[in-house]
Image (cartoon, grey):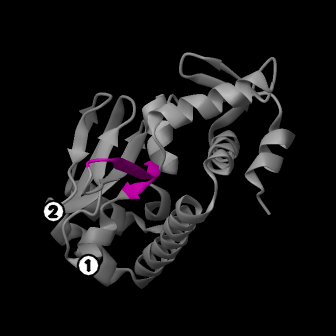
Amino acid sequence: MGVLCNLDHEALEKLNSHKTSNRYLKGQIIFYEGNQAFGLYGVYSGRVKLYKTGIDGRRQIVRICGPGDILGYRSLFAEEPYHATAEALEESTICCVDRAAFFSVIGENPRFAFDLLRKLSVELRSAEDLATSIAQRPVRQRMAELLVMLQQTYGKPAKKGVQIHLELSREEMAEMIGVTQETAIRLLSEFKKGGWISVQERCITILNPESLLEAAEIE
């Protein structure tokens, strides 16, 4: 799983001996925001969304995780409850290593600890960029930027354009950029009318990436 690949055989065996694996259906919760952190989670297959819930009840998706990604280590390091809720975006297999085994391996493998700190730094930068985007960028730019990101991360060539191989509801797309579902639908409709994208149910194909990049004003 991602940074775990750098561990030696003995360390991996220790983690495997303290690991459990469970299958989650789409929409099932892996852990809740505010719950005590008991272990390190890793995505073996499928996709998971991490979201925070505001005081008004609105959700903000802060990260989408796929195979190889790990979850919950920030809370373990800080000895704090989980900072977000993890929910399966699709049928997923999730592994969990208990807290004691995780810290034992860290103590014996300084390089592993360094890799985790570097990963934390990257995620912190992404979270800061997201907060800045939501606070300062117009909604149209945010939606264009989201589509560009989804294309770059999950896009695969199709007969026409690049198809995004990640099914997201309009509500989930709205939660990723901090807007209402109605606003997300309006923006997607605008981009579709402009010939930038095609939409079939939850499947989005990017037809004009240059226009999206220009609209997103990505440097």
Q: Please tell me whether residue 67 is drawn above or below residue 52 in the rendered image.
A: above
Residue 121: image tag: none
Q: Please tell me whether residue 88 is drawn above or below residue 135 in the rendered image.
A: above
Q: Which residue: 42% across, 38% down? A: 45
Mark whose residue sits in front, 2 or 1: 1
Q: Position of residue 111 (x, y in %)?
A: 46, 80
Q: Is residue 150 left or right of residue 157?
A: left
Q: Please tell me whether residue 142 is drawn above or below residue 171 in the rendered image.
A: below
Disc 2, SS: loop
Question: According to the image, label 2 marks what residue?
Answer: 38
Q: Position of residue 168 (x, y in %)?
A: 49, 31
Q: Position of residue 15 (x, y in %)?
A: 28, 61
Q: CA distance from mark 2 to mark 1?
A: 12 Å
Does 87 appear in magenta? no
Which stretch appears magenta?
A: 57-70
Name the residue type under label 2. Answer: Phe
Can residue 165 be seen from the camera position used here?
Answer: no
Q: Which residue: 62% across, 50% down? A: 142
Q: Which residue: 47% across, 64% down? A: 3
Disc 1, SS: helix
Residue 78: image tag: 1
Name the residue nearer the viewer: 12 or 88: 88
Q: Quadrant of the N terminus?
A: bottom left
Q: How many marks?
A: 2
Name the residue nearer the viewer: 21 or 128: 128
Q: Quadrant of residue 147?
A: top right
Q: Which residue: 59% across, 61% down? A: 133
Q: Earlier in the sequence, mark 2 or mark 1?
A: 2
Q: Please tell me whether residue 158 is drawn above or below residue 47 in the rendered image.
A: above
Name the residue type under label 1. Answer: Ala
Q: Quadrant of the C terminus?
A: bottom right
